[in-house]
Image (cartoon, rainbow, N blue to C red):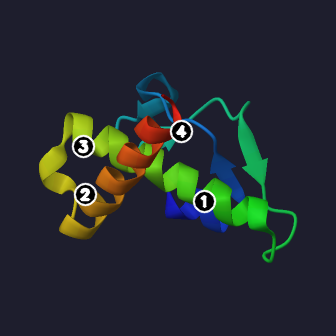
Amino acid sequence: MNKMLDGGVARHALPIRDLIVDSSNKLGVVDFERSTLRRSIFRFDWYVAKKVTHYHLYRLIAQFQPDLLTSKQAMKLNIVTKLRRAFNR
């Protein structure tokens, strides 16, 4: 994921169907229809897009391999999940 973000691409969503594993067990991402491309490093939309990408990654890890989340990642996920629920009422 960091390689993707370092390359200037952030995802707006990260459904499990967009993740693939090759024969060497390397994880890949497909379908970049809903993405933000970094035009410059000092843009607010890029900062938000990176945070959204991390949120979706942490959400997937929590769903399928929760023991892989660090306590800091789990805390961030919990905070953002509560905020999303509060704003979606």
Disc nearer the start of the sequence (1/2) = 1
Residue marked by disc 1: 50
Residue 60: which numbered mark, if any? none
Q: Would you say the residues marked 3 and 2 are in contact, meaning their CB atoms lie under 8 Å apart? A: yes
Q: Residue 27 falls in which quadrant of the image?
A: top left
Q: State the separation of the CA atoms marked 3 and 2.
A: 8 Å
In this view, 79 is above or below 29? below
Residue 29: which numbered mark, if any? 4
* Extreme residue toward the bottom, this view: 42
Residue 48 can be seen, yes or no: yes
In this view, 54 is above or below 84? below
- Residue 45: horizontal and vertical position, in percent? 76, 59
Q: Nearer the viewer, residue 12 or 32?
A: 12
Q: Indicate the secondary structure of the residue bearing disc 3.
A: helix
Disc nearer the start of the sequence (1/3) = 1
Q: Nearer the viewer, residue 48 or 61?
A: 48
Q: State the separation of the CA atoms marked 1 and 4.
A: 15 Å
- At horizontal 21% and vertical 65% (from top left) the residue drawn is 70
Residue marked by disc 2: 74
Horizontal side, residue 60 vs residue 3: left or right = left
In this view, 49 is above or below 15? below
- At horizontal 22% and vertical 35% (from top left) the residue drawn is 64
* Extreme residue toward the left, this view: 67
